[in-house]
Image (spheres, rainbow, N blue to C red):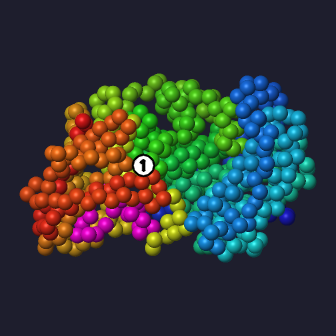
Amino acid sequence: MKKRFFRIVVVCCLGGGISLSAQVTPLPLKPVDEHRVREIASWLPPQPAGLGDPCSNRKVWDTLLKSGKYDEFLKEMEQFVFPPFSKEDYFSLFDGSAPSSGRGLNMMRERARGLSKVTWAECLTNDNRYLPLAEAGLRDILDQKSWVSPRNDFDFKNYNGVGYSVELTSALYAHTIAQTLYLLGDRLNPALKKEAVEALFQRVFNPVLDKIRTQNNDRENRFLLMTNNYNHVCLSGVVGAALTVIDDPYQRAVFAYIGEHYAQNGLMGFGDDGYCSEGVGYYNYGFGHYVLLRENIWQATGGKLDLFAIPKVRKIAGYATHLQISEGVFPAISDSHPGAKPDPAMMHYLSRNFQMGLTAYDTMSFEGKINDNRMSVMMVFPNSASLATTGAQEPALPLRSFFEQSAILITRPASGSGLGVVMKGGNNQEHHNHNDVGSYTVALGSQLMAGDPGAIPYTADIFTAEFRYTYKTLASYGHPVPLVDGKTQQTGAKARARVLKKDFTDQTDLLVMDLASAYELPDLKQLTREFIYDRNGRLAVVDRVEFGTPRTFETALITRATVTRLPSGKLLLERENEKLVVAIDSYENSYTLHTEEISEGGVPYTRIGIRLKEPVLKGAVQLLYTVE
């Protein structure tokens, strides 16, 4: 396949940096800026390079081998068999044998991981034992009909060789292949290396350039315009691969420019306050790849092009530390899984680069940890983080963190482990959205006692608008928010919490939200939720509603704790060694409790509906959480 490259007409000049304004819509496709490309090209070395050092630098690789930290990995590799491509797995979503694309996707990603592992093994041992496996694995992947996830192989164009596109998996393949070529270098068969580079142009580089040149609206390669994790993951793979294998500095500079320019769209998906609506898990994935993209470009340009120079990035870097309720405890907001935590390698990198003073992360070592041949290689070789000086130790978690633009309040006890709470405003058009305006999470010590249930396993229709909110866990029904006249929350940006009042002191935090826009009910005159947090170990959640005509009203308690009804009528929540009592007050209206266990393939949880017995014109319900 002949390498093809486009020189694209100048339309404007970005100059020496990036300006990022608060935009609702993403930056559109446009021809590359020739002036900026030539500026970047002047910073690039004559020859391409990847992350880490090639296998030929024995001083470094022998030191890693002699450290003993890779002994267990190499012992496991003695029985290694390269994961085969399975046509049955690839098409399992479409023939009905699997409920989602996960089976095919996992098969494909295991093959990329297999190529990373044999690359690592040969670089460490340097005895040609794993070189044949690496070449055979690379050959097998080059012969593989599709590099894209089955879900994204629209009309099976990739599988049938009709066209090629870039998405999460093909971007992973591109960077993994490029790193293998770079790390093994002249050890690889020259003809195989040449064929691999041609395949990268055919399947990855040229489709991206075609997209920019034609500015078409096809479904393929739309990652450039996306404002969620997809954007940074794909850009990281494409740009990282290009900087690693393309000989011509000008051509490499075009891809560095593409990374610089279109990564702004991914940043737009974060609040200006740094909040990530996708939750901790996707923060790791999406922003973790922004880190990888930044390091690739930073190293390639000798630090002259730095994606960390954007002020908003520093706020995004602080998201995880500000989101934690107590040390190591995070809410399962959106499609995060319960127990999800920030990725240590990413946090090490962020802390040292921004001098955040996260001592536990600053001192971490990543030798012996092999997840891929990209980030795992980067973290054991000199990089911008290892070259940076550490900052002053960050003080203990503050009493509260408030993402004001996103209306997310994390409030904490004054000292030690105790009752901590996350109160969520937001809107119902967030990335990986759950209809959860007004939701909250209650933590006690290391346990999540009540609140947001988190993600469920992905199914074939889970991202289809028609079906997504038929899942109770994704709809407001599976969250601790009201059910108004039997209606759950509506989807869309118009369903938005409006902060009516906030009052923060050393002893208490008060946050009042208007939730009425989340419910499509013209007769709804008022719906407010008031959070009153007392650092002595109490949280009151008070819902007040008013209708034009009498309507039914229900709120909910969501928990994975063991629930016991006490003689007093209160509820006792127990999880591990933690106990929390919940008192319910419906004021002048009586109520009934309706208990339901919900799983939908995930970790089961209990929904306790607190339902007013009779329709009301006005009503209020308070849930008072108190540490036992």
Q: Is residue 489 visible?
A: yes
Residue 305 at what x, y percent from top left? 63, 43
- 92 in the magenta segment: no
Locate residue 535: give its quadrant: top left
Above/below status of 568 relative to 446:
below
> Does residue 180 sit above or below 220 in this rendering?
above
Label 1 crowd (10 A; few <14 / some 14-19 / many >=20): many
Main SS class of the magenta portion in the image = loop
Q: Which residues are magenta?
A: 468-488
In this picture, residue 184 sits left or right of residue 240: right
Tell me if residue 546 comes above or below residue 110 in the rendering. below
Secondary structure beneath label 1: loop
Q: Quadrant of the C terminus?
A: top left
Which residue is at a point 32% across and 41% down the rendered structure image?
Answer: 574
Q: Give the percent coordinates (x, y) of residue 48.
A: 78, 45
The residue beneath circle 1 is: 332
Q: Residue most toward the left?
A: 588
Pick out the residue farthest to the front: 567
Q: Position of residue 269 (x, y in %)?
A: 47, 55
* Residue at (68, 39) in percent of width and height: 370
Image quarter of the N terminus: bottom right
Res. 254 visible in picture: no
Which amino acid type is marked by label 1? Ala
- Residue at (72, 61) in percent of width and height: 147
- Quarter where residue 85 is shown: bottom right
Q: Is 565 left or right of 577, judged from the image as shown?
A: left
Identify whether 3 is placed above or below 280: below
**Exactly how many numbered labels are in the figure?**
1
